[in-house]
Image (cartoon, rainbow, N blue to C red):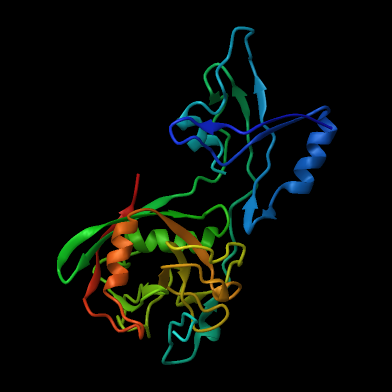
Amino acid sequence: DIFEIQLPIDYETQKHRGFAFVEYETAEDAASAIDNMNDSELFGRSIRVNLAKPVHLKETSSKAVWSEDQWLSNAMNSVDNDISSTDNNNNNNNNTKEVKSQIKDDDIDEIDLDTGRPLSKRIKAVTNPRVYIDIEINGSRTGRLIITLFSDIVPLTAENFRCLCTHEKGFGYRHTSFHRIIKEFMAQGGDMTKGNGTGGKSIYGRTFKDENFNIKHTHAGQLSMANSGPNSNGSQFFITFLKCDWLDNKHVVFGEIIEGFEVLKKIEDAGTKSGTTTKTVTIADCNEFK
């Protein structure tokens, strides 16, 4: 039986913080709930369920375990109406690598409710990274997109994009352009080798397999992988201008814009219904956002 449910609120935004505490009558019930719900899907998003074990609680303590952002970041974070990246050599399948994730299940430790911090450093919860992309249009700096990457759901795809933003593998997105912008649909870029939609490569090799399709194309500002068919992901990606549900189960969504929607609108304004750009839209700079 469930004894209590708490949905922590961010008092600045008056919205919930994206997680909850559920207290059960017995430890056995809690263990069963974790087995049943961990890594399950809820409204197209994977959810993580772990054991929070609060200890060292004083009678006078009234401080919530989620009250500090530091604790949250350390412990909880848990066309043709198709987007193609054309391969002139048609050898994607032969060059596709299957990359296995090294991410293990979260190991949440005991929490001191008086400090709101973990009692040891054994926490391995996935923290979704953020990156930024600085946009230039016709050579003039336009603004910045800040993007959250869904490492908790598609870790390999998110890491590919993160590394291409940081250039830590020796290549990446800086000074590349959005070669295809379709109004009321999407902007496609990321071809750092040819610049016209026929090139690009991933950090894992030429291409890598589709990780999963758990996240759907539900709104504007989502980032998804362009491809030339199943399991042909490289470096090309697109940003949606609206809901694109016909792309579900074909393209891997790996991130979303959290700041810079006015910049996204200017990118869309540089496109046409056919996809031909009326202005040159370039990634002037990009890196991890900390």
Across and down, in percent, residue 202 comes to: 43, 71
Residue 175, position as x, y percentages in the image: 23, 69
Residue extending furthest toward the left: 139
Name the spot of residue 125 as percent of width and height, x first: 57, 42
Q: Is residue 32 left or right of residue 94?
A: right
Q: Quadrant of the N terminus?
A: top right
Q: Is residue 175 above or below residue 1?
A: below
- Residue, x 30% and y 58% (percent of image)? 262
**Residue 204 visible, this angle:** no
Q: Nearer the viewer, residue 288 or 6?
A: 6
Considering every residue shown, the one lying at the far top of the view is: 60
Q: Give the quarter of the figure containing the C terminus.
A: top left
Q: Farthest residue in the bottom direction? A: 89
Location of residue 58 (image quadrant): top right
Q: Residue visible at 31% across and 81% down?
A: 272
Q: Quadrant of residue 31?
A: top right
The image shows residue 79 at horizontal and vertical percentages of: 44, 84
Asked if one can make out residue 255 in the rendered structure from this viewpoint, the answer is yes
- Vertical side of 250 occupied by 92: above or below: below
The residue closer to the viewer here, 97 or 226, is: 226
Name above or below for residue 264 compared with residue 54: below
For the image, the number of numbered tags is 0
Location of residue 89 with respect to 51 vertically, above or below: below
**Horizontal relation, residue 67 to residue 135: left or right:** right
